[in-house]
Each structure stands twice: as structure tokens, then as C-alpha cells.
Image (cartoon, rainbow, N blue to C red):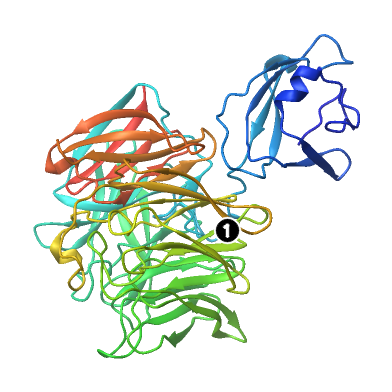
Amino acid sequence: MKILPPFLGTIILGAGLDMAAADVAQIPSITASFQGTGVEVELKYNTIESRTYQMEKSDSLANPWSNLDGPYVAPTSNLHSWLDFVEGEGSQFYQLKDNTFQPLPPANSFMGPAGTSTMHGNAASSDSTENAGPGSGPISITRKSFAGVFPSILMGSDGILVAVATKYINETPYVYLLDPDTLDELATMKLVKSETSELAGGIYSYLDEQNRLVLVNAAGLLQRIAHSQSLDGSWTLTAEDSVQIGYDDVVGIVPDYEGRVWFATAAGASDTSGAVVGYYDPSTLEIETITLPDGEEVANSISSSPDGVSVASTYALYLFRTENGKVTQVWRQTYDRGTSRKPGQLSWGTGATPTFFGPDTGYEYLTITDNADQQENILVYQSSSGNLLGSVPFLTAGANSGTEDSPIGSGRSIFVPSTYGYAYPPQATSGPSSPATAPFLGGMQRVDILPDGSLNTVWINQSLASAAVPRLSITDNLIYTVTTDQSSGLYSFTTINPDNGSIVSSTPIGSSINDNTLQMVGTISSKGVLYQGTVQGLFSVKAQ
């Protein structure tokens, strides 16, 4: 908390802050401890409430906060918040701002801008961003059809869209360079068609610090694909660097915080051997790998933090690091994978990409969902040790307790949507599900980690049917997604209040097959535009 002059050194509640008794009565009892010399203050609520207040500067310096106007946010089950003073126009107004969902994981210097350089936003796969979105007011939508599925839409520091999409006509992935305003095609590059996995061949990729797309194609080449503009205005995509890593079914790729490019394959070299996890070190040109236990596959992307690289297989959650030039397994924790794939999930096992998050460093915890029969659970681990911090039942057993989506992890909070019963294309799924089909009811759940380390469900919205992977903006305090009405087939651009799970706004998009967002994730640019892939192309959403 910045204590702005002339209030430098003011201590919160009971030790120097002069407030009217009525104002103090509205605020939960707070304890304060200074960090540094009156610069930051940690406020811990000792009641189950979290509120946001607007403080108007008073004419009286002796009682600067007498005009308290609030609260603005309904009580939730937060027991811990970070609060900032933000100076307003003309130094006349100050806002007491609830930063419950901070901090974000630290930026990875070997990637492009945080929030837009990889499918799940950052190396930690937090699906949260500092970029403000289009908001909950009137919006305009721009659509573009390419007769292909757009699961990965990225943006580098130059503001140009780089996407990987699979065309229907030949089921082959292509790199698309797109104009961020019109969505017009600037350049394309055909990749190698995968014969092993729907997710292999470059679907999971990232932008590096030079705005180059980094992927492993279905020929086993680790490539860095750059884009450039000629004097005549035309654009070109060029593979600047290609390294054969020897694996053609890579489904997960992420850099660690020292620049090594880590990867995970979908399966092993034989029908029984486990998937391969490894890295390419561009400083030594060395490739190092480790093989998972027999039968273990990887069906989601992988994540990194300063603690290491996390991989979720179809049996267990892992943390790996590099030690003495080798891949080292730091820990392995099995989870309940159930007896089969659930309807609305692509594979048998967890549907989640591992998510690093935490209220102190931004990465002290890891979360996934398991695949327990009937009742799935949200699992939280200590990222450094692998110790299970706790688990919470996810939604309603046998009705909507299942997900293929990666959780949002931000600060102390986790948000998980249901995909149970969602109708994925049959060719995208692996093996039979049990039951064979189920209605898609939707649902979303928020879980917080309390100061004592216990897990608490803050809210559940049973009727929120998300047809996309949601994204949290911590700047405008909104969760963005696309929802679907199963009775009418209508898709709507939807914003959600992360404090209580209520829908803030919902704008119809359309009800055709072209509007289906297929549980793909949207990307929010630094200019507040949201880009969302569909089964036929993509659309952008801007505030009017």
C-alpha cells in the first residue's frame, strides 16, 4: 500500500488513522504490518468478508477519510487481500482497491508479452492477465472465416496476431499471420500434418522474446517462425531456426526461466512405453529427455515457473528441473484417474494443463483436476515439494463434475468451469467415455486458499455453461468467456463477476455452427480487444 503524502507513516486502524466511528464499523477488523518504511501494508481480514471501498479525500487533514462511500463489492469468502492506494485525478481522490487476484506469475524473459504469448496466457498457464478486456458494456464484433479451427491465437509485442489453425479440407495445421483490426490474412505457412495426435504438430506453441512462433512440427522439427514486412507492404513467414529433436508427436511446449525449450510427447515410442519429457538447450545445442512410466500419456500442455516445469500425465502430476545438465524428476504425485474418460473430456485422466499460482510469489502452488468417477476434485499442491495442500469436490457428482479446461489460477483463487457432457468432435476424443453421452449443463466453481492453508469454496454457479476456456482480467475484475444456451443453440459473449460468480453482461453472438467456440481459449490484447477462435475461424470483441 502506498501511503501518499501528507499521510506518510499513517498506520491502519487503532494506531493513528482518524476515522468516524460509523466508517470504522463498516470495515472488518484488520491487522496491519508494515513492510519497508511505510510503503506496503498487508491487511488481513479476520471475518469472512472482502470489500472494496472508495475513499474521497477530505478537506480536513486530521480526518482524511471521513467521506467513506462503499462497500461496492458483495461479501465473499476471502480471508486475505492485498490493497493498494491508487492516486486519482488531481490528487483529489484515492481508491482503496482489492487486489485479491494478485500477483500474477513472474514474466518469463524468453517469451513474448505476458498474457498473449501462449495459449494459456503465460508460462505458468494461469489463464489470467493484466490486460483489461472489452468490458461489460456495448461491444462490436468482427468475424472472419477460414474454414478451419483456431485453438491458438497469440500476439507479440508488435501487435500482430499469430495463430495456428487446422483446416478442415486436409486436416493440416497452418500458421496464420493476421491483421489485429480487420482479421485479414497477411501470410500463411503450411505445417506438417500429424498422424498421431489431434494436438500434435504445433497446436500448442508460444511466441519467444523476438515475436517468433516456437513449435515442434509433426516431423519432429523444433522451429522458430519469424514474420517480417517488405517495403511493398507484404508480409512473410520464415522458419529461421529448425532443430530435429526426434519426436513427431509433441503436444506440450514451454521455455523454462533459463531459456531451455521443454517439450512433452503425447505417447511413448511403443504402445506400452510412457510419454517423453525433455528439453532442447539453445546455449549448448543439447537435447535431454526422460521417459515416463509405461502407459502414461500426456494430453495437455505443460507449464513452467522459477520452480521448474510441470507436466500432467494421464496418471500423475510432475515437476521437473535441470540438474547437472540432465532432466531431473523433482516429484511425482498420482491422482485418481477414474475408470474411463468422461463425456466432455478428450482423454482418460485429468483434462487440465497444470496451473502455477499463489498469493506471494505467483507460483508457490500448482492445481489440476483429477478424473475420479462421478465426483471429480480440484487438487492443490505445493509446487516446490509436491505435497498435496488439499482437495475440494468439483461441482455435482454425476451431473456436471468433469472438465477438460485448464483452471484459472490467480493470487489465492482458482476458477474451474465444467465441460461435462460437452460435445467434442468424435475424432478429437481418445477411447470410449462412461457414460457414452450426457447433457452439457455447465457450471463454474471458485476455490480460495485461506491463510491457514485450507481450501474453501467461495461460490458455485451451476447454470453458467461456458463454451470456451475462461480468462480472468485482474485489471477490470472480470472473467471473459463465451456461454451457450443448449435449448436454443445461442452463443453469447459473457462477462462474469469473479467475486460472486454472477453474470455481469451477456451479448448474443449467433447460433450457427460457425459460432461454436469448442472450449477454446480467448486472448486479450494490451489494447483491450479479445480474440476468440471458433470451429470455422475467429472473431474479435471491442468496446464500442
Residue at which label 1 appears = 109
Which residue is more in the foreground, 121 or 409? 409
Residue 236 versus residue 70 in the image, above or below: below
Say which amino acid is labelled 1. Ser
Give the crowd class for mark 1: few <14, some 14-19, many >=20 residues within 10 Å.
Answer: some
Residue at 58%, 85% (x, y): give it.
325
Q: Position of residue 493 (x, y in %)?
A: 30, 34
Which quadrant holds residue 435?
bottom left
Q: Position of residue 211 (x, y in %)?
A: 44, 54
Q: Is residue 450 left or right of residue 222?
A: right
Which residue is more in the foreground, 308 or 272? 272
Residue at 45%, 80% (x, y): give it.
278
Which quadrant holds residue 513?
top left
Residue at 72%, 33% (x, y): give it.
28
Q: Secondary structure at mark 1?
A: loop
Q: Residue 232: tell me if it is visible.
A: no
Residue 194 versus residue 152 in the image, above or below: below
